[in-house]
Amino acid sequence: AQSVTQPDIHITVSEGASLELRCNYSYGATPYLFWYVQSPGQGLQLLLKYFSGDTLVQGIKGFEAEFKRSQSSFNLRKPSVHWSDAAEYFCAVGGTGRRALTFGSGTRLQVQP
Amino acid sequence: KAGVTQTPRYLIKTRGQQVTLSCSPISGHRSVSWYQQTPGQGLQFLFEYFSETQRNKGNFPGRFSGRQFSNSRSEMNVSTLELGDSALYLCASSLREQGLRGTEAFFGQGTRLTVV
């Protein structure tokens, strides 16, 4: 069965500092991977996605993620965090034959001034 | 282009009642999926509809049901509400069925259901 692990429940960074959110997945074939962001009381916004090809993918709001098959990881990065990035971030995996997305438990990001 | 629209945004219901939530997908999108989000269980898949047919179903009791209309709008219904059904219900819209290569899911803002 496919699964997603986000090891960090809560992360606090200072504004302007770099950010890396971890995501590890379990999937038997080539996965489709996504990162979503959710502000309080809101829905999920797609930040970026990986389907195939270049393992470093760029997303919106200055985020990027790198797919590492050998480590079953899809970590999200941002070089300089802004206060408006404070939110909850979800990694998700999908794939052929498994139509539903499986989400990780989320990482809540707090940004200190 | 309008996004995914969910109505209502907030609902308060009493145990034992039933509730219907609505989702209008992005224009041209034919797949609608429903997810339940709770603090304890996180995001869990309920079901997916594509071209008015249920294509996939999660592990939820039969009290949870859904349907999709010819204009791709979808409704989900929960009968005999329980306190544990309190959650944020999210609808996701896709151009094609989820799981097909290149298919992205776009989410609505959700309906916050509180069962008292």
Image: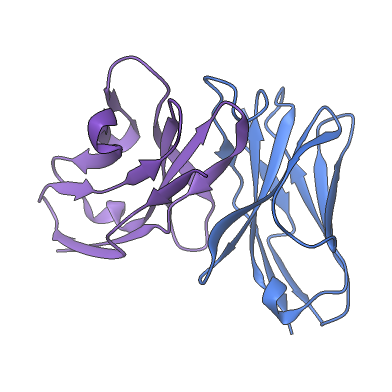
Chain colours: A purple, B blue
Q: Is residue B111 above or below residue B116?
A: above
Asked whether, in this view, residue A17 is left or right of residue B52, the answer is left
Question: Residue B61, how many percent across, how many down?
Answer: 79, 62
What residue sits 74% from the left and 85% below the top? B116
Q: Is residue B66 above or below residue A105?
A: above
All told, the count of numbered labels is 0
Question: Residue B39, how many percent across, how many down?
Answer: 51, 70
What residue sits 67% from the left and 31% below the top? B26
Res. A12 visible in picture = yes
Asked whether, in this view, residue A58 is left or right of residue B96, the answer is left
Question: Residue B7, how many percent across, how many down?
Answer: 74, 54
Q: Quadrant of the C terminus of chain A?
A: bottom left
What residue sits 86% from the left and 32% below the top? B52
Asked whether, in this view, residue B108 is left or right of residue A113, the answer is right
- Locate residue B100: give its quadrant: top right
What residue sits 61% from the left and 46% below the top? B108
- Locate residue A98: give its quadrant: top right
Asked whether, in this view, residue A29 is left or right of residue A89, the answer is right
Question: Residue A95, how many percent across, how many down?
Answer: 53, 30
Res. A81 visible in picture = no
